Amino acid sequence: MHDVVNQLINTTFGWGWPGWLISLISYLLIATLLFLIAPFQMLFLTYFERRAIARMQDRVGPNRVGPEGIFQPMADGVKMFTKEDIVPDSADKWIHLIAPCIVVAPTMFMFAVVPWGPGMVPVDLNIGLLFFFAISSVSAIGLMMAGWASNNKFALIGAMRAVAQMVSYEIPAVLSLLAIVLITGSLSIVDLINYQGGLFISTMDVASVPDFGLGWFIFTPVGFLAFIAFFIAALAEGERTPFDIPEADSEIVAGYMTEYSGMKFGLFYLAQYVLNFLLCAMTAIIFFGGWQGPGVGWLYSLAITPANPEGGWIFNVLSGALGVFYFLAKTYIFFFVMVWVRGAYARLRIDQLMDFGWKFLIPLTLVNIFGATIWVGLTRWGAAEGLAFVEGWSPIMRWAIAFVVTLALNLGTYLYLARIYAESQSERARMDDEVLERLTNVA
Amino acid sequence: MDLLIQIIFGLLAALIIGAAMMVVTVRNIIHSALWLITSFFGVAALYLVLEAEFIAVVQVLVYVGAIAILILFAIMLTRHISSEGERLLTSRWWLTAIVALGLFGAVLLPTLAGQTWNIPLPTGPAGTPAPLSGVEELGREFVGQFLLQFEVAGILLTVALIGAIVIAFEERSRRRRVLTLSEEYTLRQRQQATAAKQAPVATADVAD
Amino acid sequence: MDIQRGNIIVMDRRTGKLRAGQGLLQGLKVVWDHWAASFRKNENFTQIRGNFTVEYPDERLQLPQAYRNMPVLLYDDESGHELCTGCYQCQRICPPQVIHITQAKDPVTGKMVPAATEFIIEYDACMSCGFCAEVCPFDSIKMDHVFELSTADHDSLTMRKAQLNRPISYYTSIAPDLWEGVKAGAMKKLQGNIKRRPGVIGMAPSLTEKIKARRQELAEAAAAAPPAAAPAAPAAPAGKLTPEEKAAKLAAMKAANAAKKAGGEAAPAEAPAAELSPADAKAAKLAAIKAANAAKKAGGEAAPAEAPAAELSPADAKAAKLAAIKAANAAKKAAEAAPAVAAPTTGNGTAAPTDEKAARLAAIKAANAAKKAAEQGNNE
């Protein structure tokens, strides 16, 4: 964007504006674009979710407003805007007012590091991944404020649950990403995507692999396990079923949103869906290559880039369009999976949630980090790092051995943990029965 | 450009100090915790101005995302602490003030006085590695030069973690569990069954 | 998968086998199957998959014949006569009390006719219980199938008779079997009622041409035989009196007699029996007035003459009640030989559930009071 604005103002018009002004204008343009896109994503996702879940429940879903009901979210938006804004008498007025803003702001912030296509990233922070998760944890404060300021039991319980859940599931999410970060050796999201070129095998691991943009992490055992763990943690972080206990409507009305109405309620909704979109986007970026896909890399190599100023602008457009298409398609598929999971599973209890997070996901991701180190050692290290025995192997051989070893490790760990977890759960049920038995005898 | 950074720095400094003042002067303890979060954010922004992105993000992740939440949790789970109208100053506020001023004078004044301000930016030859701000550099230093400190901090945290678990641990058999509705129903059925069974010999078992 | 309704499906929980998430995957598979199958329409309810939705405004399910939503009134297509006789059964049974009926009266004789001049149902408070349709002895009220009745205000949901009227042919179109069951009895009763309806009373007001035709027919009949028809008409209903009418008449007579005695003079010879009014209310009123007059005379001094003024009031029954009460008071006062201070207060004027009854009671009271007065007067 900076280049384009600079080109336009200083070269085409010849006004000679200073660099910081150009930067300011380009950033403002990007921010405006994102602020326009984010609510539309939310609108589309609500419609998408309602239609998809309806199909899963043998229904049709909203199909009245506009062709196939596509304007239903607009109608809902109008409804939200025109509803009365009610603030409880005994609420803490200011915090009650600020809370939705604090919940929405981080989700908008997170867009700053999300790449939409080749060369289409608002800010390429070299700690983009960390930034993403650091900012996402801020919204927990907003939830807490909302729950406390409402002066309502349900709201407070919902906020407590939300924060407890977010804090505990951030750990497996970050640990599973740590494995990926170990492999790529960078926290930059752009690097992460660049790593995933190739065909089944990443070009970074085996340089001779043709670049079809399909060297995704999901094809490695480490990446696959990390993906499972991360996606489950993302469900918990986005408060999706089966982890929607913070707003469990059958238990605590609407959780921290109980005392909100009108557009403030709409803001919570907006934040939630935008967060879900971002989590799906992150899953697509980290494990499925983001905008990587057949053709994008080739088109981008012909486009005007800092590395290749002689390219044709048409290839910029084409590669951008194809990249954004791949990226959005992957993202929406993951959102569909979220809806699918929502259609399939019942809500967990809070103790089951904590058990699952702490006793299953965290050990699994820790072992996965170990697998990632093995992967890095086998594919990249040499005599200098103390792994002299790999020297003679060919890259493809090293990759294959790393694949087999990590697969065995991860699969074994998964099966072992699953057995232990199942046993502990049945043991727990047995002890619960014993408690019941004892209560019976006492009485 | 310099002027712009000066202005931004001034605004951030005002935000941090103002928020910190609010933390200690606001009566409602929840409000003061929220002002503390504002202050944390200001500090993170200050790190960003210093181009230490990693530290800034970690500041948000650790202080805002974890510590502030812990504080809020602690306040909200403690009874009667969040009520307003508590006295702001204790009867011995002057003693505290003297201690604080003394500490300030003893610790900070020499530091501030001995500081040389306005050092020009170090301009090394082209190609010098960036100052210690990236993740990779930090990581390498942690497992290299500062390994001992890193390990000590790690052990300390582990000890704290184990201590927390020991304090919070409660044997399951002693725990009072809240029964679910279906369990309550089962319990009631069993109780009725036992009562029906024991009805003829009820008096004999009372001493037990 | 085809499932016969009512069969029990036993799910395999796979306990004991390797538990490593297969259950979760199975659950996902089930939902996926539903999703994939939802793009075809589920026509048959033995299918557990497929889209069940009936897209309501475009598609509608056939409503069952016995479906009930709001009550309507039926009228006969051929004669144009309404089946309703105004018997008040529905008004009495209605749990939310939303039915209001005004009985029709013969304009010539003032006697009741088995028809309703007005019939109001407040749809906004109706609970669709169907008691009115069940209790109706003439099969006049039936439950309609129309359920799209939303309005922006309550007032437009207060249905008057013209809005409630539906032809029988409409009812046979929505519930043919139900009508077939009651058809014979209902039509027979209707024929009987038609005979007792003079003029165009009881015809559905919307059928203007039918009413016109009937008026013409009546006019022709009148022109054909003017002398013979005239005396016959009022005499016919006079023969049959309902118990209420009789009671009212009796009470009136008693009152009149008592008053006659008290006054010691001959009461006006035109006894209430002479003018056999069809409406018991009127009778009661008359009786009350007479009682009042009699009492007045008995007291020597004239009691205030408000009683007759009551006949101007719109509700005859109420007025009669008031008059009767006044008469009673006046009679009492007369008995105490107090000079009349015109204060016919309302002490015993509590509203009785049915006005006619109250009027009757009041008339009786008035008669009694008058009698007492007469006795005291005799003693003096």
Image (spheres, coloured by chain):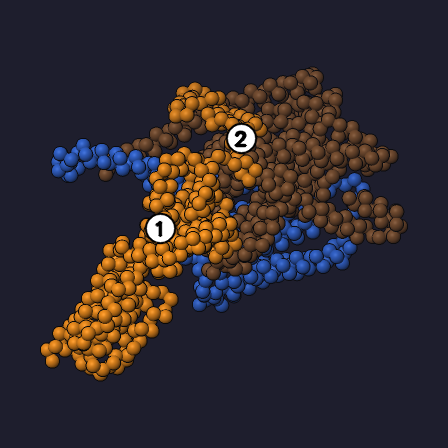
Chain colours: A brown, B blue, C orange
Q: Residue at x 31, y 64 (%)?
A: C282
Can you say whether C204 is above or below C278 in the image?
above
Judge from the rendering whether residue A165 lies leftward or rightward of residue C329; answer left or right.
Answer: right
Can you say whether B14 is above or below B156 in the image?
below
Judge from the rendering whether residue C344 lies leftward or rightward of residue B42; answer left or right.
Answer: left
Q: Position of residue C6 (x, y in %)?
A: 39, 25
Can you say whether B187 is above or below C311 in the image?
above
Can you say whether A383 is above or below C178 in the image?
above
Q: Nearer the viewer, mark 2 or mark 1?
A: 1
**Residue annotated with mark 1:** C196
Q: Residue at x 48, y 52 (%)?
A: C216
Q: Position of residue A78 (x, y in %)?
A: 60, 50
Query: Between residues B157 and A47, which one lies in front from this camera angle?
Result: A47
Judge from the rendering whether residue A171 lies leftward or rightward of residue B171; answer left or right.
Answer: right
Marks 2 and 1: same chain?
A: yes
| Chain of the residue where label 1 is placed in the rendered structure | C
Q: What kind of residue is marked 2?
A: Asn
Q: Position of residue A75 (x, y in %)?
A: 60, 47
Q: What kind of residue is marked 1?
A: Arg
**Residue annotated with mark 2:** C51
Task: Please say whether residue A89 is visible from this viewpoint.
Answer: yes
